Structures are given as structure tokens and as C-alpha cells.
Image (spheres, grey):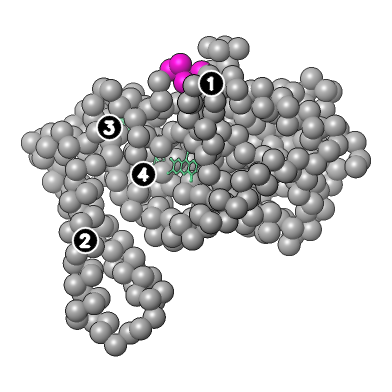
Amino acid sequence: MAEIRRITIFYFSGTGNSKGVASWFCEFAVKKDIQCQLIDISKIDDSVFDIIDSNTLIGIISPVHGFSFPKITLDFIRNFPKGKNRIILMNTRGGMKIGNHVTQGLTGIAFMLSSFILVQKGYKIIGQIPFDMPSNWISIHPALNEKTVLFLHKKNYERVKKHSDKILSGKKDFAAYRNIIQDILISPISLAYYFAGRFFFAKSYYASNDCNNCGLCIKQCPVKAIEDTGNRPFWTFKCESCMKCMSICPKKAIETTHGLWLVAGILCSTIVSALLYKVALVNIDSALFKIALFSFIYIILIGIAYKIQHFLLKYKLIGKLISYTSLTHYKFWGRYKSVRDDKWK
Ligand SMILES: Cc1cc2nc3c(=O)[nH]c(=O)nc-3n(C[C@H](O)[C@H](O)[C@H](O)COP(=O)(O)O)c2cc1C
Ligand code: SF4
Ligand code: SF4
């Protein structure tokens, strides 16, 4: 394989894990006298592609969301111009620590789908490498403790060194193939998450009574998913659940509505089930069509419920009640943000 002299790494990152891995990769490249450039996918326009020549090795890294890449990463890959460059695909998944071992997250279809799109455009995939950084999905589990977070950063730093050595010396590295069976098995869930599930999660965030309307979350959201409604932020369906807003809010006011979410979820699915199976669709046999219609109406109802919730949040008492039923409201739950290198190196 031709010698690598330049590498450009495109990254998307909600809470800093993927950005961290991208910058470590660059660090090891620079030590080998290879030029390295880091570019944030959420801040680019099409002119960025003009600066990449055909000899540059391209890296793409993003977190895995719902066993696939998030929409912003997939859109970026879909809009990538045609080319013949070598590409290395990387991801960060949700890892945990058991004893001295790092448990693995699940990549699902993230690599398969993006490789397929890029190969159609003429690119040559030379690697697919997952990194198991701390899970940042604070909506569904409490933040990992500091010791675990530091441990996972150190372990992944060593792994980035190992894999970057291999790639930058001109070899291929398909470490992801080790998990291929489980990735294929999980693929139906990744599609369900992409087409329906993520909309449900997008409406699980709200700003509690602690919000002082500083606007930071609105400004920093990588996909401009939060609207300023004058009193407190409003999460739209564009939200990708990247967790950035939750991790940066200076008042820790962004919460997941666990209690209300459960009630709204059960209520909405009961209404849709009654509508579909008893009233409207008695004669329709296609299960796929029924699921699609169910999801569509369900998402509309969730959207309406969210608007009502946002309106009611004007009343402090309602805000308090919602907060009390949110696990994210309590101190033990915590927030997650990738730690700076100087804290553990
Ligand atoms: C909405 C959401 C979905 C996630 N889905 C997965 C998943 O399917 N598989 C996995 O291994 N990790 C999953 N995670 C964990 C993240 O991929 C992981 O913590 C990642 O390193 C975060 O990277 P970032 O800090 O660059 O955003 C998910 C996290 C979130 C917030
Ligand atoms: S960052 Fe926090 S305090 Fe500021 S507007 Fe957003 S939710 Fe409110
Ligand atoms: S609203 Fe928050 S969680 Fe959703 S995409 Fe924006 S920063 Fe990420």
C-alpha cells in the first residue's frame, strides 16, 4: 500500500469520547511525521472537501447511537463527494469496566452501512475499528464513576496507539469483524431506532425549574435541535440524543422525564393500539404496514404530549412534580463528559 503522508479525520462527538479518540489518533500520526487534521462534522460546509487530495487518508469517527451511526454522521457520509481515497472508519461505543476488563458496546450496522455507501462512491475501506469508551447514555443509566471513566480513557488510549500503528504503517485493520455476528443479529433494532425510536428519545428531555434560560444548550447543540421559546428551551424532533446539552448545562437543569415518559408512553401506545386494531385497520394484514402506521401515530401523539408538558412547565409546581419522578434530577445519577488528557495521562 502507498505510504501515508497525510490524514484528515472527520469526527462527530456529543460528550467528547469520539473527539478524544480522533485527537489521540492524530497525536500518534504526528509522532510518525504524518500530517494530521481534525474536522468537526457538525461545523463544516461543502467547501471542506476541496482541501482533500486523493492521497490523503480519510478517517471518520462517531459515537454509535441505537446500533448505528447517528443521522448527522450518516448524512455526512451520504453527502460525501465521490473519490478514491483510502478510508478508515472508527466508532466509540458504550464501554463499562468489570474488574480489569473493558466490556464491549455494540456497533450494529454502523460500519456495514457506511462502508456500503462509501464503497459505492469509489472509496477503499482499509479499516473498521471500534473503541469502547465510557457509555454516555445518561437517560438510561447513571454516569459511570470517575475511576471507571479514567480507566476506560487510559485503556482506549493504548488501543488507539496499537491500531494507529497498524494503520499508519500501511496495514489494514478490521478489528470490528470480531463482533460481526452480534452486529448482524442486532440490525433490525438499529433500523427501528433510526426510523422511530430516536424521535421518542428526542422528546424525553426538558429543562427543569433550575434553568435560568442562559441559552448555552441552544447555542451548542450540534444539530440546532433546541428552540428558544422565551422562557425555557424546547426540544424538537431533530434532537439526536447526543447528550451534549445535558453534559454542558451549567445548572444541570436538563433532565429526562422518566416518570412522565413512562406514563405518556403507555397512554399513547394504548390509544394507538385501540385506534389501529379496533377501529381503522381491521382488514389490513401487513404487519410491517401496521408497525409503520403505529409508530407514525405514536410519534405524533408523543409530540402533542410534549407540547402540553412544555406549556404546563410554566407552573413551578408541575415542574417540581416532573423533576421528582426523573432519576436524572438526583445527585447520585450525575452527568457524563469525557475527561481532559491532563487528568489521567
Ligand atoms: C442515544 C444513545 C444511543 C447509544 N447507543 C449505543 C449503542 O447502540 N451501542 C453502544 O455500544 N453504545 C451506545 N451508546 C453509547 C455511546 O455510543 C458512547 O458512550 C460513545 O462513546 C459516546 O461518544 P461521544 O462522547 O463522542 O458522543 C449510545 C449513547 C446514546 C446517547
Ligand atoms: S444550558 Fe441549562 S440553564 Fe442554560 S438554557 Fe439550557 S437548560 Fe437552561
Ligand atoms: S438537543 Fe441536546 S441531546 Fe439533542 S442533539 Fe442537541 S445537544 Fe444533542
The residue under label 2 is 268
Which label sits on residue 226?
A: 4
Depth order, front residue of 22/225:
22
Farthest-out residue, left: 317
> CB under 8 Å between callouts 4 and 2?
no
Q: Is residue 108 visible?
A: yes
Depth order, front residue of 56/216:
56
> CB under 8 Å between callouts 1 and 4?
no
Where residue 127 sits, quadrant-wise, is top right
Of callouts 1 and 3, which one flags the residue occurring earlier in the amino acid sequence?
Answer: 1
- Is disc 2 surrounded by few (<14), some (14 to 19) or many (20+) residues within 10 Å? some
- In the image, which is nearer the foreground, mark 1 or mark 3? 1
Mark 1–mark 3 Cα distance, whole angstroms, equals 28 Å
Tell me the kind of residue under disc 1.
Answer: Asn
Tell me the kind of residue under disc 3.
Answer: Thr
Q: Residue at x 55, y 12 (%)?
A: 344
Which label sits on residue 328?
A: 3
Tell me the kind of residue under disc 4.
Answer: Ile
Magenta stretch bounds? 146-150
Of callouts 2 and 3, which one flags the residue occurring earlier in the amino acid sequence?
Answer: 2
Judged from the image, the secondary structure of the residue bearing numbered disc 2 is helix
The C terminus: image quadrant? top right
The residue under label 1 is 100
In the rendered view, does 306 fall on the left or right side of 98?
left
> CB under 8 Å between callouts 2 and 3?
no
Residue 143 rendering spot, x and y as whole percentages: 38, 27
In the rendered view, does 238 fall on the left or right side of 48?
left
Vertical relation: 189 (above or below) 341 = below
Residue 245 rendering spot, x and y as whole percentages: 39, 34
Label 4 CB less than 8 angstroms from ligand 3: yes
Label 1 CB less than 8 angstroms from ligand 1: no
Vertical relation: 278 (above or below) 56 = below
